[in-house]
Amino acid sequence: MDEYGVDCVIDGEAENVVGKIFREAVEGGKLPKFYETKVEEAPSLDEIPEIKNPSINGLIEIGRGCCRGCQFCSVTQRGLRWYPYEKIRKEVEVNVNAGIKCAILHAEDVLLYGSKTVIPNRDRVLELHKLCKDHVASLSWSHTSMAAVATDPKLVKEVAEIILDEQEWWGAEIGIETGSPELSRKIMPAKASPFQAEQWPEIVKKAANIMADNNLVPACTLITGLPQETDDDVVKTIELVDDLKDFKSLIVPLFFVPLGRLKNLDWFTMEKMSNLQMELLTRCLKHDIYWAKVIMKSYFGRGWGNLISPLYWLFVKVIERKAKDVYSIPSRRLW
């Protein structure tokens, strides 16, 4: 902040906060260095305006908040609100009128749109996708959850039938976080709901099969260095990554960052990594190098992609060479 001359950072939903901060700045008042919005300052649906100009990549917010309650996440501390169809339609039209023919539906769990529980509301989810596909040529998700996918495979299939009329596949970001049932029970028990936290690895594998069957290609995240993580937990996560070897996906390992209810704990850094954690990262790298090539072959089949695809292939080749030279990770043939 000092280096770039940033006076104030606002963390959280800012609709009811940013105005008074800006006013204070214009009037020469003293600004807080860091402002974390309080729960009571979160805007209601009526206080969240529609976008006035097109959004990057056609991103359309369909709701805010999360009901999962994971300890390491700050979003779960915000109230769950779903936008009405009319609000979503207006934002899609802003993008379409600007020439954007794609949409990325944004929520912490798109499959739970309109639901007040962890069980998807089938009718509302299907209506949402039909509404959007009436306006755009291609559709994707920002996020969903393994548990929601595993809960209603038929719904995922019906959504796929709506989305895949003009595109081969679609994507989403999905949190795996750990392959350890014990660690899942300790820090994210509701992430598995309506299943049991102890079933977490099986939930992930079931959801992976459902996504593969319906051409949903996710970028999955893992977190290592979580508080209370043991060597056995890391081994379980490595085993899960191995079980997902044939799952068309990216698996992105992250270091623990203190957020949510764990925000007062220490960051996990590279210097703290054990040999097992390094092994986990290298397994993920091997998985990602292979599947990145497969995904690029599909993605760059589109016309404009051929112009820039050599740069992406070069990027992956450089990583692959580095992985082989430094970490002795052997190449995995595509076919």
Image (spheres, helix red, strand yellow):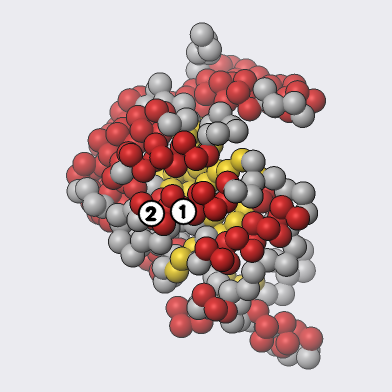
- Residue in the image at 41% along x and 28% along y: 212
User: 150 or 330, which is in the foreground?
Assistant: 150
Q: Is residue 46 left or right of residue 244?
A: right
Neighbor class of circle 2 (other Cα within 10 Å; few <14, some 14-19, many 20+) is few
Q: Which residue is mark 1?
A: 127
Q: Which mark is residue 68?
A: none
User: 149 or 181, which is in the foreground?
Assistant: 149
Can see residue 298? yes
Instruction: Look at the image and tell me in which quarter the N terminus lies.
Output: bottom right
Q: Amino acid at mark 1?
A: Glu
Q: Is residue 114 left or right of residue 25?
A: left
User: 288 or 168, which is in the foreground?
Assistant: 168
Residue 333 at x, y percent in the picture = 52, 10
- Residue in the image at 52% along x and 23% along y: 291
Q: Which mark is residue 123?
A: 2
Is disc 1 placed on a helix, strand or loop? helix
Q: Is residue 10 left or right of residue 331?
A: right
Residue 219 at x, y percent in the picture = 50, 38
